[in-house]
Image (cartoon, helix red, strand yellow):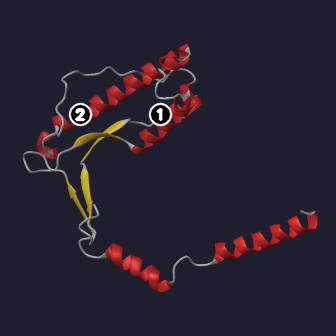
Amino acid sequence: MSFARTVLMSLALTSVAASWAHAQQFSAEEREAIVRYWKAPGRFKSETVNGVDGRPAYQVFLTPETSTWFWKYQRAIGAGKLPPTVDGSSAPVDKAEWEKWVSARLEYDRGLAQAYVEANVEKVGTPRIASRGVKPLDPGMPPTGLATAVGAPPPRFALPKIPINVTVSFEDPDVS
């Protein structure tokens, strides 16, 4: 294929792709129908999860910031690159120290959140998960290099939250 023909084909494909990018995927009527479908009464139902006493039951969850931080942490230690059959605990010494601190911090924050729920049963309702009765120790500051590699850890890894169940209803009874 000649150079001129290649250039002309590239230009033609580029102009076609550009026109497709600017074309509307759906007409205004189709977009309105989609919005009406998802806004229909009863389409979404959300409700709090209640405890045995009928009040909302708090449960300890990781915060969204913690989830993001753990993702960065996993990338920093190279855990995402290992196949599932390989034990990643043979990491260098500083990474082992990081893992020890992260595990201790997670246990500590979960313990604090659980203790808050149990201390405030009258206000927050029956906890969904009972405490193990062990008060974890504060792990202190993160090890050297951890914050540089991953970023500062969030203020709390875990907090008490009320779980919410969300149900989406479809017209077709076979779709769930």
As drawn, the label of residue 153 is 1
Give x and y (percent) for residue 29.
Answer: 45, 86
Which residue is depicted at the point 29% across and 76% down?
40
Which residue is depicted at the point 47% across and 34% down?
153
What is the count of numbered marks?
Answer: 2
Residue 1 relative to residue 169: left or right = right
Residue lying farthest front?
A: 1
> Dot 2 corresponds to which residue?
114
- Which is nearer the eye, 76 or 124? 76
- Which is nearer the eye, 69 or 16? 16
Mark 1: few, some, or many residues within 10 Å (few <14, many ≥20)? Answer: some
As drawn, the label of residue 111 is none
Give the quadrant of the N terminus: bottom right
Mark 2: few, some, or many residues within 10 Å (few <14, many ≥20)? Answer: many
Give the quadrant of the C terminus: bottom left
Q: Secondary structure at mark 2?
A: helix
Which residue is depicted at the point 34% across and 73% down?
38
Residue 66 relative to residue 136: left or right = right
CA distance separating discs 1 and 2: 20 Å
Picture quadrant of residue 113: top left
The amino acid beneath tag 2 is Gln
Q: Secondary structure at mark 1?
A: loop
In the rendered structure, which disc, 1 or 2, sits on the residue that comes first in sequence?
A: 2
Residue 95 relative to residue 11: left or right = left
Tell whether label 2 touches label 1 (CB within 8 Å).
Answer: no
Which residue is depicted at the point 39% across and 77% down?
35
Picture quadrant of residue 121: top left
The amino acid beneath tag 1 is Pro
